[in-house]
Image: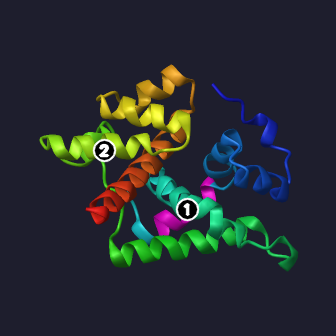
């Protein structure tokens, strides 16, 4: 299991730097420790108890992580705004937009990656396999193939010694990557 204690004394700008460099432990600490309450407040304010905080944390992570942390990198420390304030405002706006559009990655906790799509469609399974092969990160590709084989993310996290919260975030990210790659493959036809 990972030790997040080493991040407790990091300043926001140092933590921020580690997150945009894809330090996986820093990412877990950022979303699940340091700013979890800020994000949770926004979730409760917008949705009440209708959605799990963990699911919404994953959604917000995917939003900020998109395009190599493009939106997160827009935060400017020189403007004398605290990162926690910025996270609160951005998460509130993000969840408000989701509520208005109702666009969530919807999956059940035990759902496998192929069940996210259509498990009776051989052609789709082959396209998912092709899409997985296009994933550049070796660990993510391995996780995707294990999910495709029907293994639950909690078991994969244990086997690969990955924090379970972060593993669910990875699962969401992998599903989004596969969805995007399948659309690309379909457009090429």
Element assignment for label 2? helix
Q: Nearer the viewer, residue 144 or 130?
A: 130
Would residue 35 be counted in the magenta stretch?
no
x, y percentage for residue 129? 32, 39
Q: Secondary structure at mark 1?
A: helix
Name of the residue lying farthest toward the left: 120
Residue occupying the point 25% across, 41% down:
126
Q: Residue at x 47, y 70 (%)?
A: 95
- Residue 64 visible in the picture: no
Q: Is label 1 or label 2 in front? A: 2
Q: Residue at x 73, y 71 (%)?
A: 75
- Please give the range of residues in magenta: 36-45
- Whether residue 64 is situated above or below residue 113 in the rendered picture: below
Neighbor class of circle 2 (other Cα within 10 Å; few <14, some 14-19, many 20+) is many
Residue behind mark 2? 128
Q: In which quarter of the view is residue 28 placed?
A: top right
Q: Which residue is mark 1?
A: 66
The answer to if 38 sits in the magenta stretch is: yes
| Residues at marks 1 and 2, CA–CA distance in whole angstroms | 21 Å
- Residue 101 appears anywhere in the view: yes
Q: Is 25 displayed left or right of 55 in the figure?
A: right
Instruction: Give the mark nearest the N terminus, 1 or 2.
Output: 1
What is the magenta segment's predominant secondary structure? Answer: helix
Q: Which residue does the image show at 61% across and 47% down from the upper left? A: 32
């Amino acid at each position: 299991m990972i030790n997040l204690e080493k991040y407790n004394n990091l300043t926001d700008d140092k933590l921020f730097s580690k997150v945009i460099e894809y330090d996986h432990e820093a990412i877990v600490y950022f979303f699940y420790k340091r700013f979890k309450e800020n994000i949770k407040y926004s979730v409760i304010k917008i949705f009440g108890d209708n959605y799990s905080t963990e699911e919404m944390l994953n959604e917000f992570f995917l939003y900020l992580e998109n395009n190599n942390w493009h939106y997160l990198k827009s935060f400017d420390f020189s403007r004398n705004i605290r990162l926690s304030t910025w996270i609160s405002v951005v998460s509130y706006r993000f969840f408000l937009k989701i509520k208005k559009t109702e666009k969530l990655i919807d999956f059940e906790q035990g759902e496998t990656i192929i069940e996210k799509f259509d498990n009776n469609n051989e052609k789709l399974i082959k396209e998912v396999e092709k899409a997985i092969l296009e994933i550049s990160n070796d660990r993510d590709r391995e996780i995707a193939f294990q999910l495709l084989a029907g293994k639950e993310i909690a078991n994969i996290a244990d086997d690969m010694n990955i924090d379970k919260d972060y593993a669910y975030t990875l699962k969401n990210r992998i599903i989004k990557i596969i969805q995007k790659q399948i659309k690309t493959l379909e457009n090429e036809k």
